[in-house]
Image (cartoon, helix red, strand yellow):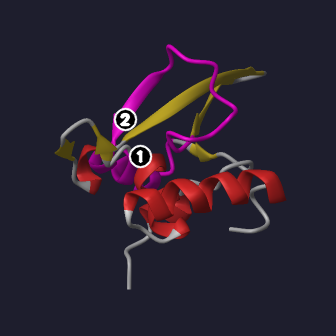
Amino acid sequence: MEQLFSHEELVRIEAAAQEAGHTAREWVRGVVLQRLTGDRRHDFEDALWPITLHRKPGGVLQELHHAGCWVPRGDEDTLTTAEARVQLATRDIRLCDACQPERFLAPLE
């Protein structure tokens, strides 16, 4: 996680996590997966995964991102976790190199 955030960002994340009663890693995961919204705690399956479209010769390339990625500009189409898994299994979508959403789609152990 230290490789993803600057020192200043880590300080703010750790403070927010402590205030919420979570570890920094749990807090980031919760925000990224949109698990901590309002009074209702969402399940991982409720997470939304933005898709950006890139026009390339020969077609359109779809790229999958996690909700906290800085690449999407907003107003992109999204997939549910189940839909994202299907797209990944059929290789109909490319994974974002910047946010590496596969980290979050992999099962927790």
Q: Quadrant of residue 40?
A: top left
Asked if residue 6 shows in the view, the reply is no
Residue type (three-letter) at the residue carrying disc 1: Gln
Say if 64 sits above or below 9 in the image.
above
Residue 16 percent across, percent down from the top left? 52, 53
Residue indicated by mark 1: 87
| Residue 63 as seen in the image, left or right of residue 97 | left
Q: Nearer the viewer, residue 6 or 47?
A: 6
| Mark 2 Cα shell of 10 Å, populated few (<14), some (14-19), many (≥20) | some
Q: Position of residue 24 (x, y in %)?
A: 54, 66
Q: Position of residue 83 (x, y in %)?
A: 31, 43
Q: Are marks 1 and 2 in contact (CB under 8 Å)?
A: yes
Q: Which residues are magenta?
A: 65-92
Q: Residue at x 82, y 59 (%)?
A: 7
Q: Is residue 75 magenta?
A: yes
To which residue does mark 2 refer?
79
